[in-house]
Image (tube, grey):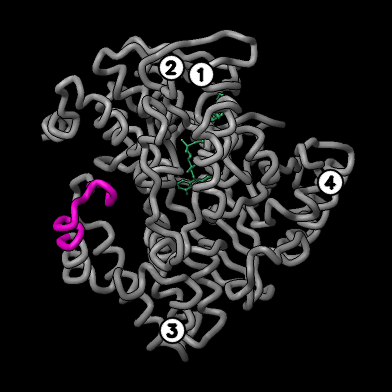
Amino acid sequence: MGGLSAGNFLAKYNKKVLIIEKHNIPGGLITSFKRKGVQFDLGIESLYELNEGQAIPQFLEFWGTSIETQKNSGDISCFIDGKRYNFHHDSLKEDFLNAFPNDKEDINRIFEVNEKISKEMFSGTEAPKPPYEMNLFELIKFGIHNYTKKPTFMKYGLKNGNDVLKELTKNPIINSLIYSQGLFPMVYMAYVYRWSVIGKGSYPKDGMQAIPNASVNSFKANGGILKLNTEVTEILIEKDVAIGVKTKNGECYYARDIISNASPHFTYELLPSNFIKKDKLKYEIRNKEIFPSACALFLSINKNYDFENTSKFSFLTSSNYKDDYKSFTPENCPIEMIVYPQKTDDTNRAVVALFPIPYEYQGCWKTSSKRERVEEYYKLKAEVTETILHRLSLVMGNNFKDSIELAELSTPITFERFTYSKNGSFMGWAIDSKNYGKFMRQKTKVPHLFLVGQWVFPGFGVAGVTASGYYLAKDLLKSDGIDLEKDYINFFS
Ligand SMILES: Cc1cc2nc3c(=O)[nH]c(=O)nc-3n(C[C@H](O)[C@H](O)[C@H](O)COP(=O)(O)OP(=O)(O)OC[C@H]3O[C@@H](n4cnc5c(N)ncnc54)[C@H](O)[C@@H]3O)c2cc1C
């Protein structure tokens, strides 16, 4: 989506743009596919930023396209140590208070803190300036602004989620419930965000693939060219400057600017081995921590199974929020299960169970150092599938088990293989307190080679990577005297 975004902005201003995609469909991690009577989406249940007037429809509108959406107003159900807690999307706090009458004070405190963080987080509509572009004066002003205008956000939002939870309540069940909407090591604001958008997001009527598909339509309408099934295998360098790319089938394409949507790790590998800066670039990112990957188990569930209005289930123990995610195995990992809205063509219900088993699990899932998917890999996948299905059935009951008509697992290796996102990360760099905010810039140290997507400012998420394309295009168009920021603001005023 980062690449499609940059391509759209540039094509709109009559730049000659070629997008080269190795897969047979566009969109990378924003994708949908069909199996056994249903269309699956890869893990995103709905997006707050897809609501009317929010970032994603605005980007699409600016490019000259749009998508149809529907509200996702499902409820959530969390199983902690096997006990079920139900939360209606429109009465979250009341449901907490009813479930924990003895923890009224803690619940009030948590909701007060969360509401303040949300308000401070969502205030201001201007596109922020990348921190690395600020001079000292602007940085100081930015810091003072944050401390005076966003005090709760600064006090709690940027600390690790589990540290803040311990501060807010001593009840491990309440902590586990807050954690149930994230399941990854993240700064607290990420958990606040997840809770604040429950029941408030939108879902594309045709599934998540509608977003990249619409982006391709506007890109092509503005003269852009998309080549699918074409993998870039080399970045061509002449006199230390990026001048083009070579693809797997041996074709070369030359351009003034080369933009990579793959992670920097894979991008730098594409530089020629005799290119002097290659090792230095690789060295600079070697210790940067990466956001953990996950597994996605795609389940086609018989249409007669009644999920009522629950759109998300979580299954965890009351100590998972304190666990190191690197210790998660199929037997002990927390699980989040998304029930997707039924689409017109679906004969079954599409359900996706997500769980954080690390990329490194059992020798990178028993793939060799070349990440080859050999017999052992498939055997391990089958075992993990069985374990997770067994765990889900123990909680959900035999009726649920009997309704499963298909179960297909994707691992962190799958994510990496499809997108060349290092270690299968689906958020780019780690977003714990140590790492959040250390953005890479779009411009690399190789003249005319740029990065776009979740690894560069302003980071992960559909809206984030689309914005990364905006920032890159803004920079590239500047040399033609085009002020994209001004045009963008005028377009919506
Ligand atoms: C399970 C899951 C849940 C998520 N939940 C949310 C959520 O709730 N909200 C949210 O906003 N975001 C969510 N995300 C994150 C979001 O989807 C990603 O941050 C975003 O889509 C990443 O986009 P990107 O442009 O950085 O790159 P990618 O999607 O990684 O795309 C990179 C593209 O480059 C192509 N490519 C790579 N190398 C080459 C090559 N050599 N030649 C040709 N093509 C190449 C790939 O095939 C791919 O199409 C979720 C993701 C997942 C997987």
At label 3, the amino acid type is Glu
Instruction: Classify mark 2: helix, strand or loop.
Output: strand
Query: In the displayed structure, would residue 246 be above or below residue 291?
Result: above
Residue 206 screen position, x and y as percent: 48, 30
Q: Earlier in the sequence, mark 3 or mark 4?
A: 3
Front residue of this view, candidates 368 and 347: 368
Q: Nearer the viewer, mark 2 or mark 4?
A: 2
Residue 418 screen position, x and y as percent: 63, 32
Q: Residue sitting at 31 percent across and 17 percent down? A: 11
At label 1, the amino acid type is Leu
Q: Which residue is mark 3?
A: 167
Q: In this view of the protein, can residue 307 be seen by the observer?
A: yes
Q: Earlier in the sequence, mark 4 or mark 1?
A: 1
Q: Earlier in the sequence, mark 2 or mark 1?
A: 1
Q: Earlier in the sequence, mark 3 or mark 1?
A: 3
Q: Nearer the viewer, mark 3 or mark 4?
A: 3
Q: Which residue is mark 4?
A: 382
Q: Nearer the viewer, mark 4 or mark 1?
A: 1
Residue 255 magenta:
no
**Horizontal relation, residue 489 to residue 363: left or right:** left
Give the Cα separation between the discs numbered 3 and 4.
41 Å
Residues marked 3 and 4 touching at CB (< 8 Å) = no
Give the Cα separation between the discs numbered 3 and 1.
53 Å
Residues marked 4 and 1 touching at CB (< 8 Å) = no
Query: In the displayed structure, would residue 177 be above or below residue 207?
Result: below
- The residue range painted magenta reads 129-141
Q: Which residue is mark 1?
A: 236
Q: Earlier in the sequence, mark 2 or mark 4?
A: 2
Instruction: Classify mark 4: helix, strand or loop.
Output: helix
Q: Residue sitting at 42 percent across and 28 percent down? A: 3
